[in-house]
Image (cartoon, rainbow, N blue to C red):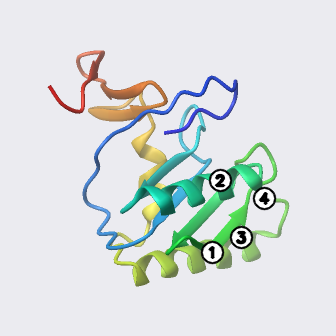
């Protein structure tokens, strides 16, 4: 999770499972409720390109493989919405999800799942720009002890 509103430099790290991703990375500025940039990937290089792509678009969704942007959707209205017609946005989101499926993603709704990793008001483990939080205990969780 990369903080994107106040230039704090905060980056929260966590380990996730269940996306099925076998290669590459994907990132989004739709990350409830703080709407920082959330990214999941199989390697640091692709994760960096995915985040940088979202930054360059001033918000949006990106899919990266082998250091190259495979698909991207700019969300130029607060990093959350597109001025494009709904049908064009829906087609682009479907294209993004197909790209992720080719990279091993299994859910079919990877960006939706990604956005809820950051929703730190619902149980149980959530990722913030300050780190992994156990919402039930109101405590940060170290990645290693």
Between tags 4 and 1, which lies in front?
1
* Pick the front one: 84 or 48: 48
In the rendering, at what x and y percent does residue 111 appear?
Answer: 49, 60
Furthest-right residue in this view: 83
Report the residue marked by disc 4: 82
Question: Which of the marked residues, 4 or 3, is nearer the chain's N terminus?
Answer: 4
Report the residue marked by disc 3: 89
**What secondary structure is found at the residue carrying circle 4?**
loop
Contact between labelled residues 3 and 4, with CB atoms less than 8 Å apart: yes
In the rendering, at what x and y percent does residue 30 appear?
Answer: 60, 48
Question: Which of the marked residues, 2 or 3, is nearer the chain's N terminus?
Answer: 2
In the rendering, at what x and y percent does residue 123 appear?
Answer: 29, 32
Tell me: residue 21, above or below residue 40: below
Question: Which of the marked residues, 4 or 2, is nearer the chain's N terminus?
Answer: 2
Report the residue marked by disc 1: 71
Between tags 3 and 1, which lies in front?
1
Between tags 4 and 2, which lies in front?
2
**What secondary structure is found at the residue carrying circle 2?**
helix
Furthest-left residue in this view: 145
Report the residue marked by disc 2: 52
């Amino acid at each position: 999770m990369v903080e994107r509103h106040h230039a704090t430099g905060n980056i929260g790290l966590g380990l996730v499972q269940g996306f099925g991703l076998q290669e590459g990375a994907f990132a989004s500025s739709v990350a409830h409720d703080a709407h920082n940039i959330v990214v999941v990937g199989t390697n640091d290089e692709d994760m960096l390109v995915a985040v940088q792509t979202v930054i360059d678009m001033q918000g949006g969704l990106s899919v990266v493989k082998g250091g190259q942007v495979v698909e991207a959707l700019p969300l130029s209205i607060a990093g959350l919405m597109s001025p494009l017609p709904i049908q064009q946005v829906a087609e682009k989101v479907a294209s993004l999800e197909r790209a992720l499926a080719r990279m091993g993603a299994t859910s079919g709704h990877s960006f939706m799942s990604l956005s809820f990793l950051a929703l730190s008001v619902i149980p149980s483990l959530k990722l913030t720009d300050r780190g992994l939080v156990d919402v039930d205990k109101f405590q940060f969780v170290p990645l290693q002890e």
